[in-house]
Image (cartoon, rainbow, N blue to C red):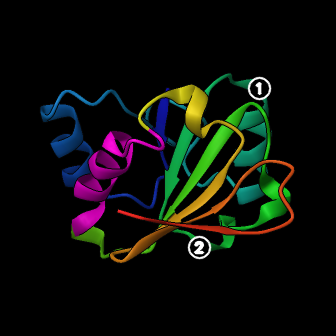
């Protein structure tokens, strides 16, 4: 399941859906509007095989690595979110749930910075 943070605009959500990428959004289908960051983590612990996309770079924290979800922090402009979500989901290193679950990732224009679960070092991956 792909979940979008509530900080992602409706037009970007609509683009993803028009491309056939299934997404749910915090405050729409999942959780409640105005949910706090720590409550989002608690929610993700209850779900399985979830990839959570946010523009809140505060989620890029290796302590948040967990076997039940993947966190993707998008360091891009508001109108670029859909393109980068699709690009990430098509990346050969992350194109299957099993390849990304457990990681915390920051996606930018130049690279993917990854904290794999149980890793002591951050890994840099090119697009």
**Which residue is rendered at x = 55% and y = 44% of the image?**
52
Position of residue 51 measured from the top left corner of the image (x, y, whole percent) = 54, 38
Q: Position of residue 87 (x, y in %)?
A: 29, 51
Q: Residue at x 14, y 34 (%)?
A: 19
The furthest residue to the top: 48
Relative side of 109 to 73, left or right? left
Secondary-structure class at tag 2:
helix
Q: Quadrant of residue 119?
A: bottom right
How far is mark 2 from mark 1, CA to CA?
A: 22 Å
Give the residue drawn at x 51%, y 42%. 26
Of labels 2 and 1, earlier in sequence is: 1
Please name whichever residue, 124 or 104, is drawn nearer the observer in this view of the structure: 124
Q: Residues within 10 Å of mark 1 (few under 14, many from 20)?
A: few
Give the total of numbered labels.
2
From what the image shows, is residue 63 above or below residue 66? below
- Element assignment for label 1: helix
| Tag 2 and tag 1, C-beta contact below 8 Å | no
Q: Which residue is mark 2?
A: 57
Left-right relation of 41 to 106: right
Residue pointed to by mark 1 = 46
Q: Nearer the viewer, residue 32 or 126?
A: 126
Q: Which residues are magenta?
A: 80-94
Q: Position of residue 23 (x, y in %)?
A: 37, 32
Membership of 55 in magenta stretch: no
Q: Position of residue 44 (x, y in %)?
A: 70, 36
Picture residue at 36% right of the left edge, 77% below the top: 110
Looking at the picture, does residue 98 appear above or below residue 74?
above
Question: Image height check: is 52 above or below 97?
Answer: below
Q: Nearer the viewer, residue 45 or 49?
A: 49
């Amino acid at each position: 399941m792909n979940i979008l943070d509530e900080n992602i605009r409706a037009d970007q959500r609509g683009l993803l859906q028009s491309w056939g990428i299934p997404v749910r959004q915090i405050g729409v289908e999942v959780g409640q509007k105005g949910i706090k960051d720590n409550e989002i983590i608690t929610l993700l612990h209850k779900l399985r095989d979830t990839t959570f996309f946010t523009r809140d770079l505060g989620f890029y924290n290796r302590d948040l690595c967990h076997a039940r979800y993947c966190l993707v922090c998008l360091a891009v402009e508001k109108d670029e979110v859909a393109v980068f979500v699709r690009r990430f989901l098509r990346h050969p290193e992350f194109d299957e749930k099993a390849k990304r679950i457990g990681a915390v990732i920051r996606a930018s224009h130049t690279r993917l910075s990854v904290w794999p679960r149980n890793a002591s070092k951050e890994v840099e991956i090119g697009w």
